[in-house]
Image (cartoon, rainbow, N blue to C red):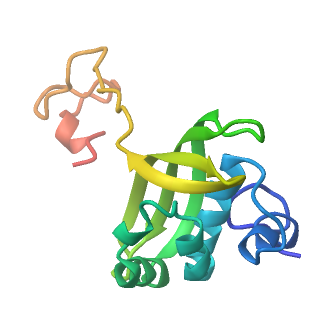
Amino acid sequence: MSDCPCGSTRAFSECCEPIINGDVKADRAEALIRARYTAHTTGAMDFILATHHPSTRSDIDETATARWARESQWLGLEILSVEGGEATDTSARIEFIARYRDAARRRHTHHERGVFEKYHGQWYFRDAEVPDVNQFRRNAPKQGRNEVCACGSGKKYKKCCSTA
């Protein structure tokens, strides 16, 4: 019994596998995003296409999507926020991060807010939005490379704690 790639800590056979195989429908939008992520990790492209909203399905580049899924090493899914998407809702927005390595072994972070819609009683992925990103603000002045290191060593920052 192996853990599901979606990160739910449940067994794959009890989590995303029945949804991907079509044995059950995703009852919530979050269950669908988890199953879609898992479908990328397992190469279940038919499920990816079938769960894309019918009105936007033709926008998918099937070849590129399949290549991306096949050539990536999927490292994990993190759900950041869920708005709506319960069994009684008809729409949802789910912000998530999917981490992966590409064919050249470079790490990537895919961050988006997925828009989901229930259509004829079934959840579908409709579109993606760019999430709001909070700008980083420094609380203290930036440490200069040639200044004495703030750690107290007496060395210049560039020769001590600098990561550059």
Nearer to us in this view, 22 or 37: 22
Residue that appears at 59% across and 65% down: 51
Q: Which residue is found at the position 77% from the left and 74% from the top?
A: 22
- Look at the image and tell me in which quarter the N terminus lies: bottom right
Residue 62 position (above or below residue 155)? below
Q: Quadrant of residue 15?
A: bottom right
| Placement of 2 over or under 108, stated as above or below | below
Out of 134 and 105, give the one closest to the viewer: 134
Is residue 131 shown above or below 135? below
Q: Position of residue 80 (x, y in %)?
A: 56, 39
Residue 81 location (% of width, % of height): 58, 35
Among all residues in the image, which is located at the extreme front? 120
Left or right of 45? Residue 14 is right
Q: Nearer the viewer, residue 84 or 146?
A: 84
Q: Quadrant of residue 123?
A: bottom right
**Rendering coords of residue 3 (x, y %):** 79, 67
Q: Residue at x 35, y 80 (%)?
A: 64
Q: Is residue 158 left or right of residue 50?
A: left
| Residue at 64 percent of width and 33 percent of height | 84
User: From the viewer's perspective, is 154 left or right of 90?
Assistant: left
Q: Position of residue 19 (x, y in %)?
A: 76, 68
Q: Quadrant of residue 125?
A: bottom right
